[in-house]
Amino acid sequence: MQVAAGVATVELSNPGKRNAFTWGMYDALESICSSVGDDAEVRLMVIRGAGGQAFAAGTDIAQFTEFRSGDDGIAYERRVGRMLDALLAVEVPVLAVVQGPAVGAGLAVAACSDVIIATEESVFGVPVARTLGNCLPPTVVARLERRLGSGRTMAMLLTSTLLPASDAATAGFVASVVPAAALEQEVATVTSRILRGAPLTLAALKEIDRRLAREVSPADDLLRRCYGSADFREGVHAFLEHRRPDWKGR
């Protein structure tokens, strides 16, 4: 994390893998989010992908080969959940700057940010029903439904569709879509507008949004079933072998 002029900038970086999250990246982002409030000078947090080609393309799939049971999947989702909870708890506004894919965990991070700016080629989605055969926790689905709408969210998830930035903007998920050449100017403009705001007002608005968020029920049984399935193991191997999974429904 770098802090300058009241802005804490965090880069998601996993070179060669489109910034897909490693376990260490999840833990580091959780720690960063928890520490942002310790610096009284920070008025805004910006999250972006390193290299300018991707925001974050989900989780580094090679790590899933370590899983031996559905409980491993639950432990993984709880790890991701702790990071997302820390992100949602950040008191200052969080701006996600998206270039390229924001997929899986990348989409979850964007959805848990307050404002999203995207370039025209950016895409959003969670195509796990097509690629891995795992599942999403209720808190992530609920957040997507709040930001995208329930109908669009379920259509995106059930059809494994990647949503173009223009459609995400139409849904209100993305605040602005700009050509790549205009991205830094748009980031500067939005940053300036946020920094001009009254800090206590911005913090209060975020807390109101948190309080309005509806409660969701746990779904460990569903997560355990998906992550413990033969289909999930097939999905991971198929992904790493660059072939289509052969789903068996068990």
Image (cartoon, rainbow, N blue to C red):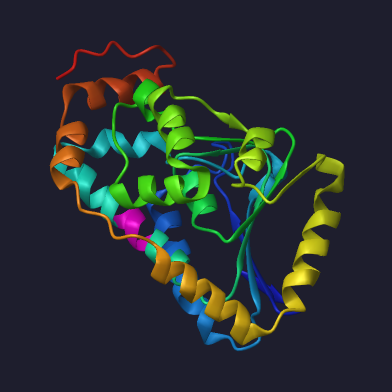
Question: 6 or 141: which is nearer to us?
Answer: 141
Q: Is residue 210 above or below residue 98?
A: below
Quadrant occupied by the N terminus: bottom right
**Predominant SS of the magenta segment:** helix
**Can residue 90 be seen in the rendering of this structure?**
no
Residue 206, given in percent of the width and then of the height, sits at: 52, 72
Question: 237 or 178: which is nearer to us?
Answer: 178
Specify the quadrant of the image occupied by residue 8: bottom right
Q: Is residue 81 magenta?
A: yes
Q: Is residue 26 magenta?
A: no
Q: Is residue 180 above or below residue 130?
A: below
Specify the quadrant of the image occupied by residue 88: bottom left
Quadrant occupied by the C terminus: top left
So how many labels did they put on this image? 0
Q: Which residues are magenta?
A: 79-83
Residue 127, given in percent of the width and then of the height, sits at: 43, 28
Residue located 29% across and 60% down the image: 215
Instruction: Please indicate whether residue 108 sits to the left or right of residue 199 in the image.
Output: left
